[in-house]
Image (cartoon, rainbow, N blue to C red):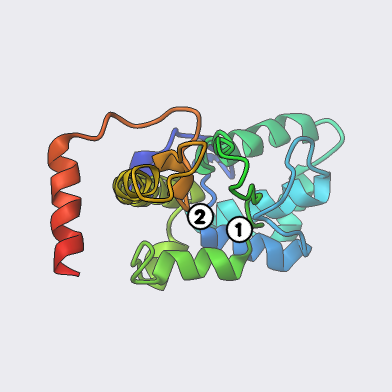
């Protein structure tokens, strides 16, 4: 299956076989139904035994192990908890997107600095299936890991940022060279809704600007 090809392999030995552990959105929702823990905001620095049991059971169930949660619970003892937790956390890290750098603060003090909105299941679903978002089917989204969805979101964000920067170049030029130019010149980034993180993409070329100008003329 595609998720297995895209992620680092993490295996768990169970009933004489090695099972590949991955945490897709479907697995996370199943685990949340069992534990009541918000899996989109869960802190897995040192998860308790009950959460380790639920995560392992749901991941094994997805892999086709055909186990029960009681059977998985009997595997977790005071002696085995540490080693099982390590495997579960390795699978968790393989399935989750890498931490993203915080967006750069606006250089212009007049621009608001709004913190990131908390990710909820409703928002994650809407962004995935919306035609203005990723445009996935519900089944595609459920079978993806957050790492896969995060990679698609990164591409979508880069596209949005590039379009916003092109518009920002035009807007800042008009503002800075107009009849009522501000005392402090506005930057193109100050007009962006999705500011860049510390690392910016490559330079915008003249062809990019001309392409954006043609779009504005047609609008």
Instruction: Check the image and name the residue furthest to the front.
Output: 179
Foreground pick, 99 / 76: 99
Q: Is residue 177 visible?
A: yes
Q: Is residue 53 left or right of residue 161?
A: right
Percent position of residue 77, x then y: 83, 39
Foreground pick, 12 / 112: 112
- What is the quadrant of residue 68 in the picture? bottom right
Percent position of residue 208, x then y: 18, 42
Foreground pick, 214 / 22: 214
Q: Is residue 4 left or right of residue 211?
A: right
The residue depicted at 75 percent of the width and 35 percent of the height is 45
The residue depicted at 15 percent of the width and 36 percent of the height is 206
Q: Are marks 1 and 2 in contact (CB under 8 Å)?
A: yes
Location of the C terminus (image quadrant): bottom left
Mark 2 burial class by Cα count in 10 Å: few <14, some 14-19, many 20+: many
Percent position of residue 73, x then y: 77, 51
Residue beneath label 2, please? 24
Label ID, residue 133: none
Label ID, residue 28: 1
Foreground pick, 21 / 175: 175
């Amino acid at each position: 299956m595609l998720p297995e090809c895209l992620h680092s392999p993490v295996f768990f030995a169970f009933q004489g076989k090695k099972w590949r552990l991955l945490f897709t959105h479907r697995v996370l929702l199943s685990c949340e139904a069992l534990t009541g823990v918000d899996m989109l905001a869960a802190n897995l620095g040192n998860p308790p035994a009950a959460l380790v049991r639920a995560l392992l059971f749901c991941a094994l169930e997805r892999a086709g192990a055909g186990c029960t949660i009681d059977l998985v619970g009997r595997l977790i003892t005071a002696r085995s908890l540490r080693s099982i937790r390590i495997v579960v956390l390795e699978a968790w890290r393989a399935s989750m997107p890498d931490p993203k750098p915080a967006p750069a603060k606006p250089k212009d003090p007049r621009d608001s600095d709004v913190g990131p909105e908390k990710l909820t299941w409703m928002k994650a679903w809407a962004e995935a299936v919306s035609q203005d978002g990723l445009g996935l089917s519900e089944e595609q989204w459920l079978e993806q890991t957050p790492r896969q969805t995060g990679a698609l979101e990164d591409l979508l964000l880069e596209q949005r940022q590039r379009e916003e920067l092109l518009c920002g170049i035009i807007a800042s030029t008009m503002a800075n060279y107009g009849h009522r130019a501000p005392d402090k010149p506005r930057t193109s980034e100050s007009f962006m809704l999705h500011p860049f993180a510390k690392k910016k993409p490559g330079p915008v070329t003249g062809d990019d600007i001309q392409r954006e100008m043609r779009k504005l003329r047609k609008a």
